[in-house]
Amino acid sequence: MMQFNLDTCVGYHDKVLLALMVAADKNQFILGENVRAFEKEWAEFNNAAFCVGVGNGTDALRIAMLALGVKPGDEVISPAHNVSYTALAVTSIGAKNVYVDVDPKTMLMDLNQIEALITPKTRAIIPVHLYGQMVNMAELHAIARQYSLLLIEDAAQAHGARHETQPPGTFSDAAAFSFYPTKNLGAWGEAGGIITNTPAVAERARMLRDGGRIDRYIHFLPGINSGLDELQAAVLRAKLPYLKQSNEARRDLALRYTEELAGVGDLQFQHEQIDTENVWHLFVIRTASRDKLMAYLKTQDIPSLIHYPVIIPDQPFAIADAQGQGPFPVSRECASEVLSLPMFPAMTEVEQAKVIDAVKRFYSNVF
Ligand SMILES: *Cc1c(COP(=O)(O)O)cnc(C)c1O
């Protein structure tokens, strides 16, 4: 079966191993020099003033909200078509999820539907840059400012992405990243980070991830224990210099898929906005025959995945809070039609041709 190949066959594998050995030799495993250095490097990469390394992307969202003062009972708006972790972070701090449907072309949060959802309790909006394409942040920022709402970006799928040349974090109070192994910049374990340009937010986030401590013995805030792991920081530092080229490799693969599969069956692709730099975290197609296509690809030894088959307001953890919301017709349609084709930076043309041929073969039989 074709593998979702992560790091083993690419040039930096040895560099990562070496970085791990050097870091382990320092015998300093908690919030050490690699964490500090990665925070500086990741902030610079995103033209941001600060980065605070945390344990994973979900904690990045959670700590960003806490640092910005989102409180239990506050309403937080995020997209219905998404991975669950965004809404789980909101739920974990006692805030209420309010879901917005997505745009049928981009499959991103529909900015035209946000204002209708704003109530006196609304405190924040979390745009999710799904599949590697950023939400139009300049436009969203105007809405947030008009209603004095906080903006926290879920940039877990958007390492290196730009909208109108601006990286995540530019138009918001904070942006949260995950460095889960399969993300565009992935650790060899769990890791996350928050970027912000506001000194007080960075300071509070730093305190919150470290048990809310202000010194060794005094826990000032009800913080959590979620620092970026020192060894993972060493891995991330070793891999960061390769992020641009691996994003380019993804883009080349995405372009080839789009060219080769245009007009095949009823296939549709994620529409790209003008002036966007998509980093193609996933290559997602849409088709009414999704389940059949997926089953056929499996018979051809080609793995495909669904991101995501259940809309968030229908998730068991979310149902009670989502009562009366919706009905989210576009998100539901996405959930039943999307399929992610194999896509990873080290994928070869031969491997990709095999996928393309199989998809074409499927449609030549179906239609
Ligand atoms: C991966 C992901 C998260 C969660 O990150 P973890 O590091 O797994 O906690 C949140 N939001 C989105 C959009 C993601 O893709």
Image (spheres, rainbow, N blue to C red):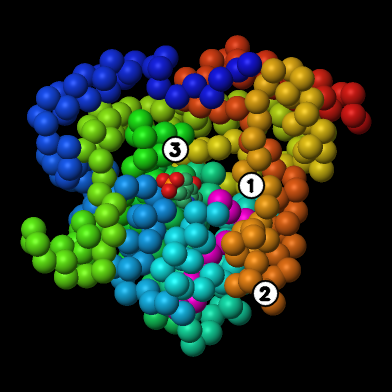
Q: Is residue 201 visible?
A: no
Residue extent of the magenta highlight: 74-83
Q: Nearer the viewer, mark 2 or mark 1?
A: 2
* Image height of 184 relative to 313, above or below: above
Instruction: Estimate the spatial distance between the alpha carbons at disc 2 and disc 3, rounded to whole Å.
Output: 32 Å
Dots 3, 1 in contact, CB < 8 A:
no
Q: Residue at 40% across / 17% down in the picture?
A: 8
Q: Amino acid at mark 2?
A: Gln
Image quarter in which the C terminus is found? top right
**Could you tell me which residue is drawn at 36 percent across and 67 percent down?**
65
Taking depth in this image into account, of 18 and 214 the one nearest to the observer is: 214
Q: Mark 3 Cα within 10 Å, few/some/many (few <14, many 20+)?
A: some
Residue occupying the point 50% across, 54% down? 85
Ligand 1 neighbours mark 3 (CB distance < 8 Å): yes
Give the structural element (helix, strand or loop) at label 1. Answer: loop
Mark pair 2, 1: CA separation: 21 Å
Q: In the image, what residue occupies the spot 42% across and 34% down?
A: 181
> Where does the image place residue 29, in percent across and percent down from the top left?
17, 37
Instruction: Note whether 5 is above or below 258 in the view shown.
Output: above
Which residue is identified by label 1?
Answer: 308
The residue where tag 2 is placed is 323
Q: What element does badge 2 sit on?
A: loop
